[in-house]
Amino acid sequence: MLLRFCLAACRPAGRALALPHSVPLSRFSQRSVHQLAFATAAASRSPFCALSAAFTSHPSSSSSIRSSPLSTLAQMSNPTDLVEKAKKAAAFAAVDEYVKDGMTIGVGSGSTIVYAVERIVERVKAENLKLVCIPTSFQARQLIVEGGLVLSDLSRHSAIDVAIDGADEADAQLNCIKGGGACMLQEKIVAYNAKRFVVVADFRKKSETLGQQWKAGVPIEVIPLAYVPVLRKLESFGGKPVLRMAKAKAGPVVTDNGNFVVDCDFGLIQDPAALDKRIASIPGVVETGLFVNMAEKAFFGMQDGTVETRTKN
Ligand SMILES: O=C(CO)[C@H](O)[C@H](O)COP(=O)(O)O
């Protein structure tokens, strides 16, 4: 079942979901399997499937692996496996707590959300839930369609009961950096129009201050013709902006909305609300990946298999 979702999630790989090649891979390594999936996409053109397929096929795929103590040890401490289990645990917990019969659900984007949709589909089948799903990206739309869920949009269903989405980082106040998958514009529109917005993430995304864990910078969606002056302006704000480049295409990543993405490193972000406003005020900026004061709860899958939650004070 999960593999089916992964395959669905893989299809939209071509455009927006690519590793920013201007950013050294080492800045993502270890911490972000999400980005590793993007790196994998460079070779396979399938950003999420390689990763999730690895998760689904991993545990007992080979008897020789099971019989080798060294392999077993490697398997037990495999960081990819831990991260995938953490994502799944967080996503399942959030869906179980928030999704109720009759709801309109905002479906986020990324690799963790694949597990949330898996759980929604399971529950729809088991409990005969009547749900309507609003996607936040091409990928989310594919997940909804492939899962056999009811697809709608904001024109038909503008009142969303709950939006569930991943994050690249969430701080102690539940402010988030989002847009590692370049979907932040639609994600923010859906989250803004949801009565409740909840975040699902693995342990690597949990921090006290934004910029502590996510080192690739704040994703910013920019109108293509404005990207050079926007880069200059961001530099004048003290940021280190780079245009996100595609891996499976020559040139920049192009979002689902036909725009570019600039990733701008500001170091530790002490005042995300002020920074968000400042960036958004630059003509040509369509949206930032700073989600300030939007989430009411975050579910973090931890290394030990538990799920930790944070709620807004
Ligand atoms: O904002 C996003 C896409 O634009 C994702 O939600 C965010 O990048 C987290 O992704 P993942 O669940 O793969 O770690």
Image: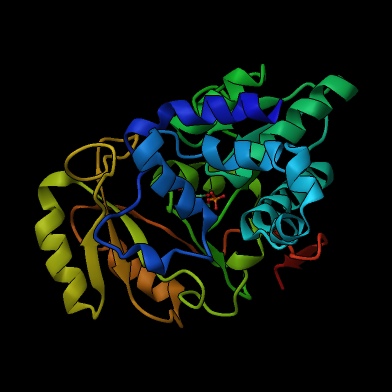
Q: Quadrant of residue 310?
A: bottom right
What residue is shown at x 79% (from left), y 47% (from top)?
66
Residue 42, can we see it? yes
The quarter in which the N terminus is drawn is top right
Q: Quadrant of residue 218?
A: bottom left
The picture places residue 85, in percent across and down from the top left corner, at 73, 51
Residue 133, can we see it? no
Q: Return the residue nearer the eye: 106 or 305.
A: 305
Q: Is residue 212 left or right of residue 53?
A: left
- 292 over 132 or under it: above or below: below
Residue furthest right as drawn: 127
The quarter in which the C terminus is drawn is bottom right
Q: Quadrant of residue 21?
A: bottom left
The picture places residue 162, in percent across and down from the top left corner, at 68, 42
The picture places residue 90, in percent across and down from the top left corner, at 74, 53
- 105 over 29 or under it: above or below: above
What residue is shown at x 21% (from left), y 70% (from top)?
234
Q: Return the residue nearer the eye: 191 or 3.
A: 3
What residue is shown at x 76% (from left), y 53% (from top)?
68
- 288 over 257 or under it: above or below: below
Q: Is residue 51 left or right of residue 244?
A: right
The number of numbered discs placed on residues in the rendered structure image is 0
